[in-house]
Amino acid sequence: MRQMDRAPSEERIHVTGRRTRVRPGMEIRYAAVHAEIPSAVCDALASCGVVRWQIWRDGRGLFHLIETTDRYEVMVERMLRIGPVDPDWDAIISELLEDGTDSDEILPLVWTMTGTAQFAGAEGEVLPAPAK
């Protein structure tokens, strides 16, 4: 999912779905290092617009649901301007995740629903609420 409002009346939050892969045999270590990420990394992500970041694991596959105040690309640009926040953390994550174009992708939004509206497409277009 990407660039989606929660509901027309709420503050605009951009939601991005991202898929990555853990290297073979690193699944348990990946979960362990994410038990608590360094506070400097959390603070930097928050200062760049991350509201919430959730990660689910399915075997070696990871699904990230990232909520930001601006588009995901804006948050990434801000992080790049800050530069390395915790090089040790970056090295650990680099060791744990596969690299390459097939192992990290942003997923396009197809559809979602809230209690009051439906949203479709990459721009989060508001559709009429279902009839009750």
Image: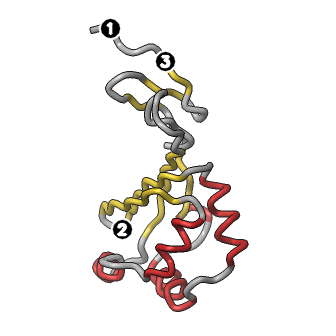
Q: Are marks 2 and 3 in contact (CB under 8 Å)?
A: no
- The residue under label 2 is 60
- The residue under label 3 is 127
What type is the residue that disc 1 sits on?
Answer: Ala
Q: Is residue 23 above or below residue 129?
A: below
Instruction: Kindly state the secondary structure of the residue where label 1 is placed.
Output: loop
How far apart, in angstroms, are the residues tagged by discs 2 and 3? 36 Å
Q: Report the disc number at residue 22.
A: none
- The residue under label 1 is 131
Q: Give me the residue at 55% from left, 62% from top.
A: 104
**Is 83 displayed left or right of 5 in the figure?**
right
Instruction: Kindly state the secondary structure of the residue where label 2 is placed.
Output: loop
Number of on-image labels: 3
How far apart, in angstroms, are the residues tagged by discs 3 and 1? 12 Å
How far apart, in angstroms, are the residues tagged by discs 2 and 1? 41 Å
Mark 2 surroundings within 10 Å by alpha-carbon count, few (fewer than 14), some (14 through 19), many (20 or more): some
What type is the residue that disc 2 sits on?
Answer: Arg
- Residue 49 location, quadrant: bottom right
The quadrant the C terminus occupies is top left
Q: Is residue 65 above or below residue 36?
A: above
Q: Are marks 3 and 1 in contact (CB under 8 Å)?
A: no
**Is 56 displayed left or right of 80 in the figure?**
left
In this view, the residue in front, 53 or 18, is 53
- Residue 111 location, quadrant: top left
- Residue 125 location, quadrant: top right
Q: Give me the residue at 32% from left, 8% from top.
A: 131
Residue 6's x, y, as percent?
44, 36
Q: Give me the residue at 68% from left, 76% from top.
A: 82
Mark 2 vs mark 3: which is more N-terminal? Answer: 2
- Tell me if I can see residue 26 in this picture: no
Mark 3 surroundings within 10 Å by alpha-carbon count, few (fewer than 14), some (14 through 19), many (20 or more): few
